[in-house]
Amino acid sequence: MASRSTRRPTIRDVASVAGVSASTVSKALKGNYSLRDSTVERVRQAADELGFIPDSRGRALASGRSFTVGLITTDSSGRFSIPIMLGAEDALSAGEMALVLCDTRDDPLREQHYLKALVSLRVDGIIVTGRRVEPREPIDVPIPVVYAFSPSTDPADTSVVVDDHAGAAAAVRHLHTLSRKRIAHVTGPESHLSARVRAAATQEAASTTFAGPPLYGEWTERWGRLAVDVLLRDHPEVDAITCGSDQIARGVCDRLRELGRSVPGDIAVTGYDNWSVMALASRPPLTTVDMQLEELGRRTAKLLLDAIAGSPRPGPQKLPTRLITRESTLGT
C-alpha cells in the first residue's frame, strides 16, 4: 500500500485550487481590502480545504511584527481577567494574532520579569489588567500598551474601564419602577474604590428613598447574611436591598429566606457583576448589573490594534454596563 504524502500544502497549491495567482492568495490571507469579497472567500475556502497554514515566521519577517500580544494581569483567580482575555482574543483572532497570558500574582518583581520577557519576545503590544478598579502605575515599555479594568494613573494612557456609577444607578431606577420605597445598600470594603463608587451612586439615585448609611463589609456571602440582621434591626421598613456584588446578594437572599421573608415579595434584592456561578445559583436567581467584561476585552484589543497600526486613542474610556433582570426583583 502506498504511503500517504505528508507534504504540507503550499501557497501555490492554494492558488491552483482557487484559480488565482500566488500573490493574490498572499493578499487575501493577509486581509487585503483591495480584493473582492468573493475572491477572498474563494481563497479562504481553498486554504481550508487543503489545510494550508501560513508560515508565521515569514509573515513576521516580512512585516517586522510578531503578531503576538501580551496580557499582564494581577487577577490570579481569573474572575475578571478571563472574560477580558476571551473578549480580547475575539478581536485579535480576526487579525490572526496570538495572546500570551502572564499572571503577576500581584508581585511587582514578577511583573517586571514578565515585561522584560514580553519585550524580548518582540510582542506587538501589551494589555494590562487586574482584579481591582483602582488606578495603577503605568508600565514603561517601548511598545503600545492599553489598560483594561484597572486604569493607568497617567490620563494620557489609553484605559478602558467599567462605568460603575451608571451601573449602580440603573439598579436603583429599576427598583423605583417596581415602587420600592426604602432601598438599602450592602457592599464590600470601604477601602475598595468600586465599593465606594457603587455606594455613592446608589445613595444619589435613591435620594429620599435611601435607607442609609451604606453597609460596608466583605465581598462574601457571609457578610450578606450578617448585613441582613443589621438592616432589619435598624431599618425594618426596608423593601429593597442593592448589593455591591453577587456574592453578597446571594448571602442576603439566603438570610432573608431563613427569616421567612419573601424575595422579592417582601424585599427585592439586586446584585452586581452578573457572575453566573452566583447569580444563577442564588435562590431566587439574581437581578444584577453585568459589567460586560468580554466586550471590555474586545474594545481594549481593538484600541491596542489601532495603537499598533499607528493610530492611538489616548485617555480613559468608560464602557456601559447592562442590567439583567431576574426573579429576585421581578418574581416568578
Image (spheres, rainbow, N blue to C red):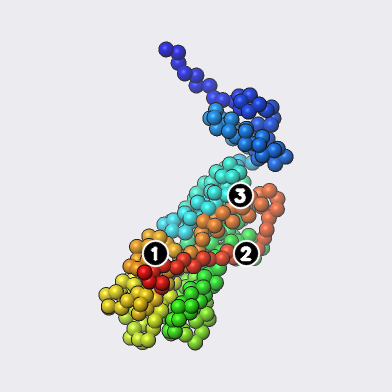
Residue 147 is drawn in which quadrant?
bottom right
Mark 2: give few (<14), some (14-19) or many (20+) Cα within 10 Å. many
State which quarter of the image contains the N terminus.
Answer: top left
Q: Going 33% across and 86% down the picture, which residue do you hit?
A: 233
Give the label on residue 279, or none. Answer: 1
Whether residue 44 appears in this view of the structure is yes
Looking at the image, is mark 2 or mark 3 earlier in the sequence?
A: 3
Q: Which of pointers 1 and 3 indicates the residue nearer the eye?
A: 1
Looking at the image, is mark 1 or mark 3 earlier in the sequence?
A: 3
Q: Residue furthest front?
A: 332
Residue 25 at x, y percent in the picture: 65, 31
User: Does residue 304 lie above or below 174 as drawn?
Assistant: above
Secondary structure beneath label 1 = helix
Q: CA distance from mark 1 to mark 2?
A: 29 Å
Q: Which residue is mark 2?
A: 316
Q: Going 38% across and 60% down the picture, which residue do you hit?
A: 277
State which quarter of the image contains the C terminus.
Answer: bottom left
Secondary structure beneath label 2 = strand
User: Does residue 128 lie above or below 187 as drawn?
Assistant: above
Nearest the camera: 177 or 292? 177
Secondary structure beneath label 3 = strand
Residue 247 at x, y percent in the picture: 38, 67
User: Does residue 250 lie above or below 177 as drawn?
Assistant: above
Q: Which residue is mark 3?
A: 125
